[in-house]
């Protein structure tokens, strides 16, 4: 019973964070969610928990697809294209990992996504504010 309450609290906590978050924060949360699911999926592979593996890796793929769909190629140009290519590659490697039960493929995706997230996290808050203000002006 306590586990159900903890999960419910976690879902509500995430909903409240998203409700007040700007797009920059939402992208950070999505990246972290994908990393969490990848780590869980890797553990499931190592424990031979096929049902858990499927659920976790499917969730990670869904999040990475959402990140890919959120790319703005008009603004991001070549960089957005390169990141989109990496996201596509990650989806392929997750599928490979699922088929082959390969924790190494998951580790590769974790490393790639961690690099992207690290770069995203290193954007100075002043630059985030400028981008959000520019976006608000365009709406």
Image: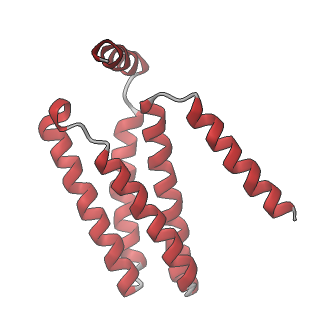
Residue at 52% x, 69% y is 56
Residue 36 pos. (x, y %): 53, 58
Q: How is the image coloured?
A: secondary structure
Give the quadrant of residue 109.
bottom left
For the view shown, which residue lies furthest in the right direction?
1
For the view shown, which residue lies furthest in the left direction?
78
Give the quadrant of residue 96.
bottom left
Residue at 50% x, 43% y is 29
Residue at 20% x, 41% y is 80
Residue 134 pos. (x, y %): 30, 15
Residue 87 pos. (x, y %): 28, 56
In the picture, which quadrant includes the C terminus? top left
Taking the image as shown, residue 58 lies to the left or right of residue 109, namely right
In the picture, which quadrant includes the N terminus? bottom right
Residue at 41% x, 60% y is 62
For the view shown, which residue lies furthest in the front direction?
139
Decide which of 65, 24 is in the foreground and name it.
65
Q: How many marks?
A: 0
Residue 135 pos. (x, y %): 32, 19
């Amino acid at each position: 019973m306590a586990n159900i309450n903890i999960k419910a609290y976690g879902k509500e906590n995430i909903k409240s964070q998203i409700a007040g978050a700007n797009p920059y924060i939402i992208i950070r949360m999505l990246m972290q969610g994908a990393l969490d699911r990848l780590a869980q999926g890797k553990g499931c592979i190592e424990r031979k928990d096929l049902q858990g593996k499927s659920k976790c890796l499917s969730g990670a793929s869904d999040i990475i697809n959402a990140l890919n769909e959120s790319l703005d190629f008009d603004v991001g140009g070549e960089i957005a294209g390169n990141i989109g290519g990496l996201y596509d590659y990650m989806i392929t490697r997750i599928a490979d990992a699922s088929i082959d039960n390969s924790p190494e493929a998951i580790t590769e995706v974790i490393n790639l996504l961690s690099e992207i997230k690290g770069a995203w996290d290193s954007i100075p808050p002043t630059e985030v504010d400028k981008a959000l203000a520019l976006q608000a002006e365009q709406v």
